[in-house]
Image (tube, rainbow, N blue to C red):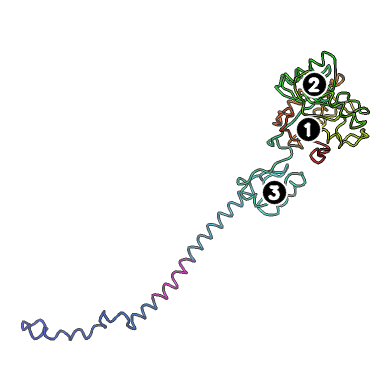
């Protein structure tokens, strides 16, 4: 009440009095005991709050991740495996069932692939299957022993399907044969050598007799067709048990001449003593073709080989049915040799 007085002046001269009841001045708070008390409390609060907040956040995040993982596991276990074995349907989740699937695939002869590929099958390439039609296959149809009365029939079927083949021919001097050598070349097939005489005893008697026979067929075919033949097939194959001379000396000679020789890895069986039906010849070829990326198919062009002619059309259809590419032998063809010429060298 006194300060409300109109006297004024003397009251104003004592301003210190009320200030004595105030807490310490703000300029003295920094560095004071109170400041350090507050600082310690704040630090303690942060030390508790930060880890707690982080723990809650990570806890929630972990929960979500676990839920996603569970969902993915369920998806994987209900989806078919990349190459499901026959008879195995959708499986309940669990490692044991996946293990079983793997065993089944192995029993079926299929390829094995690691378990981690089953989690995200879309990320991995499909393993190549033995019988897969997706695998690119190149097939070379080869006919030995021609030309013959069957050659025009074979050529007609090949023309109909626009397929080029390889004819390993022997020396025949009649006019029909001469015309057939020319026709084989003119129609885009590969004309190749199969000896002149095809008489094992004379041909394989010595290196000298082999050289004579080779020169004879090479020159003869060049005379008639104007084409140099680059490929050779030994009568009976390089692995024949007829030759008394080491086959390697003949192979060495061919190497010197720059001639590549071809055996076969697929046999139609048309030269065996068993008389196969055309269907069986096709079956024989198809059974083996699925095993190889490059197949050299052995067939014969001879007057008596009527079944081979009958088999050719369904064989082409079956090969095209599995997506195989049918080509004539050329310098890019993967060699199929029972005795590797590269290991024999030259003399
Ligand atoms: Zn032959």
Q: Is residue 66 above or below residue 249?
A: below
Whether label 2 touches label 1, CB < 8 Å: no
**Circle 2 sits on which residue?**
221
* Helix, strand or loop under label 2: helix
Q: Nearer the viewer, residue 17 or 245?
A: 245
Q: Few, some or many C-alpha atoms within 10 Å of disc 1 (few <14, some 14-19, many ≥20)?
A: some
**Circle 3 sits on which residue?**
113
- The quadrant holding residue 299 is top right
Q: Magenta span covers which residues?
A: 42-54
Residue 176, given in percent of the width and then of the height, sits at 82, 14
Q: Residue at 81%, 39% (x, y): give it.
A: 345
Q: Nearer the viewer, residue 261 or 106?
A: 261
Indicate left or right for 244 with 291 as reference. right
Determine which of the numbered discs, if any, sits on residue 260 in the image. 1
Q: Residue at 55%, 56% (x, y): give it.
A: 67
Residue 239, given in percent of the width and then of the height, sits at 87, 36
Residue 233, given in percent of the width and then of the height, sits at 82, 30
Q: CA distance from mark 1 to mark 3?
A: 39 Å
* Helix, strand or loop under label 1: strand
Q: Is the shortest distance between ligand 1 and the CB of mark 3 under 8 Å?
A: no
Residue 106, given in percent of the width and then of the height, sits at 75, 47
* Helix, strand or loop under label 3: loop
Whether label 1 touches label 3, CB < 8 Å: no
Q: CA distance from mark 2 to mark 1?
A: 16 Å
Q: Nearer the viewer, residue 33 or 138?
A: 138
Extreme residue toward the left, this view: 6
Q: Is residue 319 above or below residue 66?
A: above
- The quadrant holding residue 42 is bottom left
Q: Few, some or many C-alpha atoms within 10 Å of disc 3 (few <14, some 14-19, many ≥20)?
A: some
């Amino acid at each position: 009440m006194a300060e409300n007085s109109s006297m004024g002046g003397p009251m104003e001269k004592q301003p210190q009095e009320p200030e004595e009841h105030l807490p310490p001045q703000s300029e003295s708070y920094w560095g004071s005991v109170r400041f350090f008390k507050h600082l310690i409390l704040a630090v303690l609060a942060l030390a508790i709050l930060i880890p707690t907040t982080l723990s809650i956040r990570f806890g929630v995040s972990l929960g979500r991740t676990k839920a996603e993982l569970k969902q993915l596991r369920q998806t994987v276990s209900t989806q078919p495996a990349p190459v499901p074995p026959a008879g195995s349907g959708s499986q309940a989740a669990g490692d044991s069932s996946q293990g079983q699937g793997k065993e089944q695939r192995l029993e079926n002869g299929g390829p094995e692939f690691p378990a981690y590929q089953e989690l995200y099958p879309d990320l991995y390439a499909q393993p190549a299957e033995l019988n897969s039609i997706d695998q690119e296959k190149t097939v070379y149809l080869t006919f030995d022993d021609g030309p013959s009365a069957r050659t025009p029939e074979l050529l007609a079927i090949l023309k109909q399907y626009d397929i080029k083949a390889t004819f390993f021919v022997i020396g025949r001097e009649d006019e029909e044969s001469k015309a057939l050598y020319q026709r084989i070349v003119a129609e885009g097939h590969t004309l190749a050598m199969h000896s002149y005489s095809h008489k094992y005893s004379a041909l394989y008697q010595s290196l000298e007799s082999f050289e004579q026979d080779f020169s004879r067929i090479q020159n003869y075919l060049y005379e008639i067709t104007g084409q140099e033949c680059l490929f050779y097939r030994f009568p009976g194959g390089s692995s024949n048990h007829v030759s008394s001379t080491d086959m390697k000396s003949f192979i060495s000679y061919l190497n010197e001449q720059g001639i590549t020789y071809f055996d076969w890895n697929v046999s139609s069986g048309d030269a065996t003593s068993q008389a196969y039906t055309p269907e069986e010849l096709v079956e024989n070829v198809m059974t083996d073709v699925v095993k190889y990326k490059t197949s050299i198919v052995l067939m014969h062009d001879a007057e008596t080989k009527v079944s081979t002619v009958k088999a050719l059309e369904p064989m082409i259809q079956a090969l095209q049915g599995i997506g195989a590419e049918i080509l004539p032998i050329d310098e890019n063809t993967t060699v199929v040799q029972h005795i590797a010429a590269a290991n024999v060298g030259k003399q």
